[in-house]
């Protein structure tokens, strides 16, 4: 696992670019893997049924790379930073689903009611941005945001009419997030 995990030193120092993809196949523990795979299945199956497995695979792997590149940009000056997991890729699928299959809702434990998917998306981005700003978190918030942005980009590329249909939500999720990501990257 050590040879394949996401490592700032391994990627930037040793030029092991393969780590941007191989780190997706390792997880911290069974709970981490299970949570990612349940999330992937819950959102990915709907996308796959409606849009085909090819599009889901493209979004998944693009979001994986985008998530790790975002983490690398923000954590580049932290040589000891290491991570594993497919959370960025899964976030790409979730956010592509929110835009390509609008009007959905999501149950978030422990809430007894479903949240509209747009509310979930806003809360997710806000929590992830807050998490990036906190020191000492072991959660890869940077990868989550990068993956989510890639999922939204994939949705817009696949169906450009999303610009008109979901303009407000798209702007609310991308403009402040990109501004804050630029801030975090410059601050690093």
Image (cartoon, helix red, strand yellow):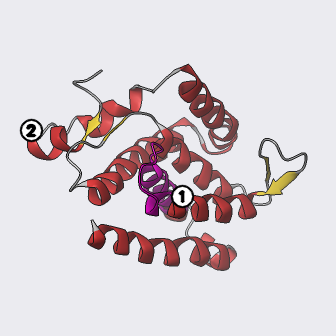
In this rendering, does residue 161 appear at all? Answer: no
Along the viewing direction, whichever of 168 and 73 lies nearer the viewer: 73
Quadrant for residue 5, please give it: top left
Residue 166 screen position, x and y as percent: 67, 73
> Residue 36: x percent and y percent?
57, 33
Magenta stretch, residue numbers = 131-155
Tell me what residue is drawn at x 49 percent, y 51 percent: 144
Residue topped by disc 1: 128
The secondary structure type at the circle numbered 2 is loop
Predominant SS of the magenta segment = helix
Q: Residues within 10 Å of mark 2 (few under 14, many from 20)?
A: few
Report helix, strand or loop for mark 1: helix
Residue 124, given in percent of the width and then of the height, sits at 62, 58
Q: Is residue 176 left or right of residue 120?
A: left
Residue 44, percent across and down?
62, 38
Which residue is outermost to the front? 136
42 inside magenta stretch: no
| Residue 46 visible within the image | yes
Residue 100 lies in what quarter of the image? bottom right
> Magenta includes 137?
yes
Residue farthest along the left direction in this orientation: 14
Seen from the viewer's position, the closer of residues 156 and 52 is 156
Q: What is the CA distance from the residue labelled 1 to the residue labelled 2? A: 29 Å
Which label belongs to residue 3? none
- The residue positioned 43% from the left and 78% from the top of the image is 179
Q: Which residue is mark 2?
A: 14
Q: Residue at x 54, y 48 (%)?
A: 91
Q: Is residue 40 left or right of residue 154?
A: right
Marks 1 and 2 in Cβ contact (< 8 Å): no
């Amino acid at each position: 696992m050590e040879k394949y995990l996401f490592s700032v030193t391994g990627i930037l120092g040793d030029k092991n670019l393969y780590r941007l993809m191989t780190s997706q196949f390792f997880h911290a523990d069974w709970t981490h893997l299970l949570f990612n795979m349940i999330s992937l299945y819950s959102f990915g199956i709907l996308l796959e049924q409606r849009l085909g497995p090819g599009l889901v695979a493209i979004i998944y792997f693009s979001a994986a790379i985008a998530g790790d590149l975002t983490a690398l940009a923000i954590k580049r000056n932290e040589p000891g930073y290491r991570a594993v997991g497919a959370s960025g890729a899964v976030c790409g699928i979730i956010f592509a689903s929110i835009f390509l299959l609008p009007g959905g809702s999501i149950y978030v434990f422990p809430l007894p009611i479903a949240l509209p998917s747009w509310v979930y998306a806003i809360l997710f981005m806000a929590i992830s941005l807050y998490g990036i700003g906190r020191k000492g978190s072991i959660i890869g918030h940077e990868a989550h945001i990068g993956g989510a942005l890639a999922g939204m980009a994939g949705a817009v590329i696949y169906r450009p009419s999303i610009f008109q249909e979901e303009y407000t939500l798209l702007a609310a999720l991308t403009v402040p997030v990109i501004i804050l990501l630029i801030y975090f990257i410059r601050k690093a």
